[in-house]
Image (cartoon, coloured by chain):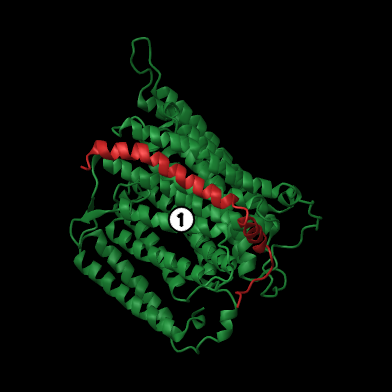
Chain colours: A green, B red
């Protein structure tokens, strides 16, 4: 892979890595006795290791100009592998924290293994590690195909991919040491946040530079979704993480916001992280890989444009539904609730567009588990957005808030929508990237599909039951006007559901491991003969069926 | 004009409505503009060809 870089790019990499190592060294020196010092060492070790990798190929011959006749897919390949590694890590910690709620002794009396530290390792691991790497890997692939242009250079995609993973490692290791800003989904401290901004600006620049060189006149809608994801996440991340560190040698910082403004900024960030990280980016994935895999154009291109702007305009206002019945002014709560309800329109437009695309190709959905992953994802997307709009209604929220119903809702979206569309896209992408005719085993994709579906369904049903039961127990009064149940009684009532939830999560993890094995075997070439490089089509073992007239 | 809380709230409550409607109308006009139809039709079909090389 190094041989693909020009000598100028190799030198630039080494210069950047030396700078990074120096910053890491400064962090390690200034942060003696503080977690930031440990992070400094991690930065030094990662940078120096990469310098050695670069030096090993520094004097390799220049790459031939012939490479410019192909798309640049090496970063996507590594990105797919990192996606699957983070999937297994993040979901493993998910099963652990789920088990911890059922069997609290599993914390082993160790501070690093307490629920409060493991839980962000799980959430950041799956959202940023698994989801983020999947978005980066697929966005580079989709961007080039839809622009008919190669990535502008061979250094910046690696900077984005590896720099982003460095951020994920700093985040996860920080949580184990107790480093947190106490902002949900924005836990990493100020230095990690600054690093992510640098990486993210380069990511956006890759997008703009490739689009500027595009040969296809129209920018395909998938790119709009990916760009909205990159741009808005940058804005959210910068504003919500405005903070003043105690000193340059301290991990701890204090937020620029306080009180209800802090809460509003955090949930403006938090809900739009759901909207633009977990929805917009993955819709970009869906709008490319689903038509591609089905071999049919998207049902309505116009509808996809309207859904795009609908989501982009309206999600921005929905965050305050996380703060019903709080000190937030009531009109802001009502505003958030109203926009959450209106959001159902563009959300269902996308879900309906995906399913209408498959209408007439249901035999493909039946025969091809990869396409079925994407179909199930669209169904879960429709269900979850409906549930979300419903839960944003203030009186409904009175029952659901602070209960496991919210946890169930999030996982219907994260497992059912985000993970399923990602696995479907990856099964579509892997044979194309490694020039294999098909995945190593179609059977294992089936196994993965059913493990994922049953895991999700068990998880979501357990949480619906426990959440509504919890909500009802917390608001049941006796004839004296006092609460009928103590909090601990509601905890005891949750126990069976927590066991069921951990089991559902375990099934989902087993599915991800199955998928990783299948991808590994496909990469190692335990399959049919290699394809011609120009052939980027989905697998062709399906019976050809005449397309109905449209 | 002073930037008191009440002023900002009044501004967002009234003009917020209008600029959101204006943006929505703009999107609908773009989407249904007749001459854009051909471009959209081409865009949705063009991802399906098997061509996997950058164009010159």
Q: Position of residue A56 (x, y in %)?
A: 44, 84
Q: Position of residue A228 (x, y in %)?
A: 46, 55
Q: Position of residue A415 (x, y in %)?
A: 53, 46
The image shows residue A320, relative to residue A56, as above or below, that is above
- Which chain contains the residue that carries disc 1? A
Q: Residue at x 18, y 56 (%)?
A: A246
Camera-nearest residue between A468 and A356: A356
Camera-nearest residue between A63 and B14: B14
Q: Left or right: A29 with respect to A108?
A: left
The image shows residue A234, relative to residue A147, as above or below, that is above
Which element is circle 1 on?
helix
Query: For the residue carrying disc 1, how many other residues have a C-alpha within 10 Å: few (<14), some (14-19), or many (20+)?
Result: many
Residue A274 visible in the picture? yes
Q: Residue at x 71, y 50 (%)?
A: A365
Q: Residue at x 59, y 65 (%)?
A: A146
Residue A103 visible in the picture? no
Residue behind mark 1 = A229
Q: Position of residue A151 (x, y in %)?
A: 51, 72
The image shows residue A421, relative to residue A99, as above or below, that is below
């Amino acid at each position: 892979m190094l041989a693909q870089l020009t000598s100028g790019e190799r030198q630039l990499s080494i210069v950047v890595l030396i700078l990074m190592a120096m910053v890491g060294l400064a962090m390690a020196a200034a942060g003696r006795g503080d977690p930031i010092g440990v992070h400094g060492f991690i930065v030094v070790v990662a940078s120096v290791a990469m310098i050695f990798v670069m030096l090993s190929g520094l004097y390799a011959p220049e790459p031939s100009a012939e490479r410019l006749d192909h798309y640049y897919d090496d970063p996507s390949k590594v990105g797919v592998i990192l996606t699957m590694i983070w999937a297994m890590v993040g979901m493993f910690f998910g099963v652990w924290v789920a088990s911890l709620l059922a069997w609290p002794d599993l914390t082993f009396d160790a501070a690093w293994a307490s629920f409060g530290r493991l839980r962000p390792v799980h959430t950041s691991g799956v959202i940023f590690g698994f989801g983020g790497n999947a978005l980066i890997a697929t966005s580079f692939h989709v961007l080039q195909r839809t622009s008919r242009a190669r990535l502008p250079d061979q250094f910046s995609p690696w900077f984005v991919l590896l720099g982003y993973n460095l951020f994920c490692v700093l985040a996860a290791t920080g949580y184990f040491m107790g480093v947190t800003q106490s902002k949900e989904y924005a836990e990493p401290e100020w230095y990690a946040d600054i690093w992510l901004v640098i990486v993210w600006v380069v990511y956006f620049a890759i997008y703009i530079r490739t689009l500027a060189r595009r040969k296809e006149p129209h920018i395909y809608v998938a790119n709009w979704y990916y760009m909205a994801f990159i741009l808005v996440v940058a804005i959210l991340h910068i504003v919500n993480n405005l903070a003043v560190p105690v000193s340059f040698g301290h991990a701890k910082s204090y937020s620029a916001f306080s009180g209800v403004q802090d809460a509003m900024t955090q949930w403006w960030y938090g809900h739009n992280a759901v909207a633009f990280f977990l929805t917009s980016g993955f819709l970009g994935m869906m709008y490319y890989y689903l038509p591609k895999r089905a071999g049919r154009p998207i049902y309505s291109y116009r509808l996809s444009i309207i859904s795009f702007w609908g989501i982009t305009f309206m999600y921005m206002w929905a965050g305050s539904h996380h703060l019903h019945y709080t000190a937030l002014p009531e009109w802001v709560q009502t505003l958030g609730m109203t926009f959450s309800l209106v959001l159902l329109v563009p959300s269902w437009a996308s879900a309906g567009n995906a399913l209408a695309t498959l209408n007439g190709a249901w035999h493909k959905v039946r025969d091809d588990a990869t396409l079925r992953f994407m179909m199930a994802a669209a169904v879960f997307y429709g269900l979850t957005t409906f549930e979300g709009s419903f839960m944003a209604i203030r009186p409904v929220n009175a029952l659901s808030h602070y209960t496991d119903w919210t946890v169930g809702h999030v996982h219907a979206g994260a497992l059912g929508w985000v993970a399923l569309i990602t696995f479907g896209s990856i099964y579509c992408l892997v044979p194309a990237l490694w020039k294999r005719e098909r995945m190593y085993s179609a059977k294992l994709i089936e196994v993965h599909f059913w493990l994922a579906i049953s895991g999700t369904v068990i998880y979501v049903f357990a949480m619906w039951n426990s959440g509504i039961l919890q909500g009802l127990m917390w608001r049941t009064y006796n004839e004296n006007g006092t609460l009928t149940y103590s909090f601990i009684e509601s905890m005891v009532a949750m126990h069976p559901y927590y066991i069921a939830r951990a089991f559902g999560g375990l099934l989902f993890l087993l599915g991800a491991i199955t998928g990783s094995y299948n991808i590994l075997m496909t990469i190692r070439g335990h399959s049919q003969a290699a394809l011609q490089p120009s052939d980027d089509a989905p697998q062709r073992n399906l019976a050809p069926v005449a397309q109905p007239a449209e | 004009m002073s930037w008191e809380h009440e002023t900002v709230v009044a501004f967002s409550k009234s003009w917020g409505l209008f600029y959101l409607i204006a943006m929505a109308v703009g999107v609908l006009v773009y989407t249904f503009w007749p001459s854009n139809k051909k471009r959209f039709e081409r865009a949705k079909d063009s991802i399906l060809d098997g061509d996997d090389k950058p164009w010159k």
